[in-house]
Amino acid sequence: MYDTILVPTDGSEPANRAVEHALELVDRYGAAVHVLYCVETHRTVSRH
């Protein structure tokens, strides 16, 4: 049913649950899994 699964995560608890679910699907269907770790960055640009 699944060949490849992409799992974006930010390390939060809801994202960790999504990773666990994805790993269950990987085990069930023999799919490849790709994990994308997402972080929010803030960039302050100073203009002189």
Image (spheres, rainbow, N blue to C red):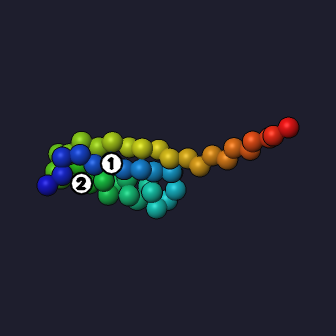
- Which residue is painted at 52% across and 56% down in the image? 12
Q: Residue 26 placed where, x, y %?
A: 23, 49
- Which residue is painted at 33% across and 48% down in the image? 6
Residue 6's disc number = 1
Q: Earlier in the sequence, mark 1 or mark 2?
A: 1
Disc 1 to disc 2, how far (Cα)?
11 Å
Q: Residues within 10 Å of mark 2 (few under 14, many from 20)?
A: some
Q: Residue 30 placed where, x, y %?
A: 17, 45
Q: Residues within 10 Å of mark 1 (few under 14, many from 20)?
A: few
Name the outermost residue toward the left.
1
| Mark 2 lies on residue | 25
Which image quadrant: the N terminus? bottom left
Name the outermost residue toward the front.
48
Q: Find numbered disc 1 in the image and state the secondary structure of the residue it sits on.
A: strand
The residue type indicated by label 1 comes to Leu
Which image quadrant: the C terminus? top right
Q: Residue 40 placed where, x, y %?
A: 59, 49
Q: From the viewer's perspective, is 11 left or right of 46?
A: left
The residue type indicated by label 2 comes to Leu
